[in-house]
Amino acid sequence: MNSPSHFTTAIGASLIACALGCGGESYKASARTTAEFGSKSAKGDLHDGILRIRQPPLPLPHWWSRYRSVLAREAKIEIEVIVDARGGELSDADRAYNRIMVAKIHEVYGPEFLTNVARAVRFDEPMPEIPERPRELTPSAFQSAPPDFGAPYGPSGAIP
């Protein structure tokens, strides 16, 4: 698991960039550093066998807690609500984290898995077949990560 010093280093780099002039290239450099931190954090969690999606604290529908518990119980996928997401938007680090995690979830369970489970829970339909999860989560999906996932369902965070 990643140590707090990685987070402190990323925050320190961001503060130094702002002290030297927030904006332009300095801002882009700090965003890249933060995204790199999110990617490293996701790779560390995969190495530890953890599948997790980070979600901003959006207004959640009545079926959300059942959806979350089905994913945790049946597929061993955690959903972490990031309470400090500003304005309901995830940070660059959280979005980079989700890109890697969602790519791995798509690889392990199929690209429609999250949507199909949400639909089954939401409309009280039969649950899709959940394939057996591999013992080890290897970094094979890192090269083919989807372009952007700000939340489990896409950049907008829309729930299916």
Image (cartoon, grey):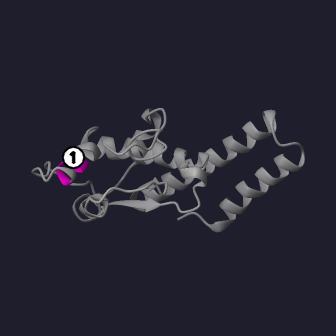
Reading the image, the residue beneath label 1 is 119
How many marks can you see?
A: 1
Residue 64 is left or right of residue 154, and the answer is left
Boundaries of the magenta span: 117-121
Q: Residue at x 46, y 59 (%)?
A: 45
Q: Nearer the viewer, residue 86 or 95?
A: 86
> Residue 10 is drawn in which quadrant?
bottom right
Q: Nearer the viewer, residue 30 or 134?
A: 30
Query: Quick check: is 118 in the magenta stretch?
Result: yes
Q: Nearer the viewer, residue 66 or 135?
A: 66
Query: Quick check: is 27 in the magenta stretch?
Result: no
**Outermost residue toward the left?**
126
**Mark 1 surroundings: few (<14), some (14-19) or many (≥20) residues within 10 A:** some
What kind of secondary structure does the magenta stretch mostly adopt? helix
Q: Nearer the viewer, residue 115 or 39?
A: 115
Residue 131 visible to an observer of this rendering? no
**26 above or below 81?**
above
For mark 1, give the secondary structure: helix
Q: Residue at x 80, y 33 (%)?
A: 24
Q: Position of residue 76 (x, y in %)?
A: 29, 61
**Image quarter in which the C terminus is found:** top left
Q: Residue at x 69, y 65 (%)?
A: 5
Q: Position of residue 102 (x, y in %)?
A: 39, 45
Q: Position of residue 152 (x, y in %)?
A: 40, 47
Residue 12 is left or right of residue 68, and the answer is right
**147 above or below 65?**
above
> Residue 26 is drawn in which quadrant?
top right
Q: What amino acid is labelled 1 in the image?
A: Arg
Q: Position of residue 126 (x, y in %)?
A: 9, 51
**Outermost residue toward the right?**
20
